[in-house]
Image: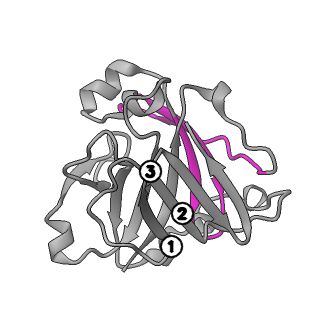
Amino acid sequence: MLEIDHVIRFVPGRDAVDLDGFTVEPGRAHTGQGTRNVRVMFDRNYLEILWVEYPGEVVARGLDFLGRCTRPYTAQPFGCVLRGTMPAALRARFVPYELPDSPGTVLQLLAEQPAAAPFLAVFETDDREAMWASRRAAAPYLIHPNGARRIVHATFTCPAPPPIDELPDLRFASGAPRLDLDLDGLRRSYTP
């Protein structure tokens, strides 16, 4: 079974981050990958706001994050990383990607990620609970003025939905780029 580990919103830079009502965790630089982030941490998952700091490193890693971050964007500016175990038929569609700043940590990337589809990857694990955001974040970052406690459901609307079956907390729809999040009854929508 797979579930949302985190949802990604790709932006041009730190100045493009608008997270009113949320407590923002400072995030970190992804050394060797050329990106930086801030995060909104919830109990089981989180929202990552990601931008490019070093374009040369991004290009060298073979990720399409430049097109996802720049405006006007040339690739879908949203993504999702799932966690759990994949059935063999689904795993065959993914390729391993070792995180450059965490040797030995492998993320499975969807092998064919068209620019019009959201970025999609999976952390394979038998212990999903060990990866909950609340196990990794400091307690003050889990409390939000707007009362949000977790991403209950995410809907990615895009011109080219990925070939993944709908999951209990994740849905893909055809249309103009948009990300809709259900955060325990609080709704947030993002467009490029």
Q: CA distance from mark 2 to mark 3?
A: 15 Å
Dot 1 alpha-carbon crowd within 10 angstroms: few under 14, some 14 to 19, many 20 or more = some
List the residue tagged with mark 3.
175
Q: Looking at the image, which residue sits at the far front? A: 175
* Picture residue at 31% right of the left edge, 39% below the top: 115
- Indicate which disc residue 169 carries: 1
Q: Is residue 138 left or right of residue 66?
A: right
Question: Looking at this view, is 16 or 97 the one in front?
Answer: 16
Q: Looking at the image, which residue sits at the far right? A: 145
Mark 3 secondary-structure assignment: loop
List the residue tagged with mark 2.
154
- Indicate which disc residue 183 carries: none
Is label 2 in contact with label 1 (beta carbons under 8 Å)? yes
Q: CA distance from mark 1 to mark 3?
A: 19 Å
- What is the x, y in percent for residue 139? 74, 62
Residue kind at label 3, given as amino acid type: Gly
- What is the x, y in percent for residue 43? 65, 69
Q: CA distance from mark 2 to mark 1?
A: 6 Å
* Picture residue at 41% right of the left edge, 78% below the top: 127
Q: In the rendered structure, which segment of residues is drawn in magenta?
A: 22-50
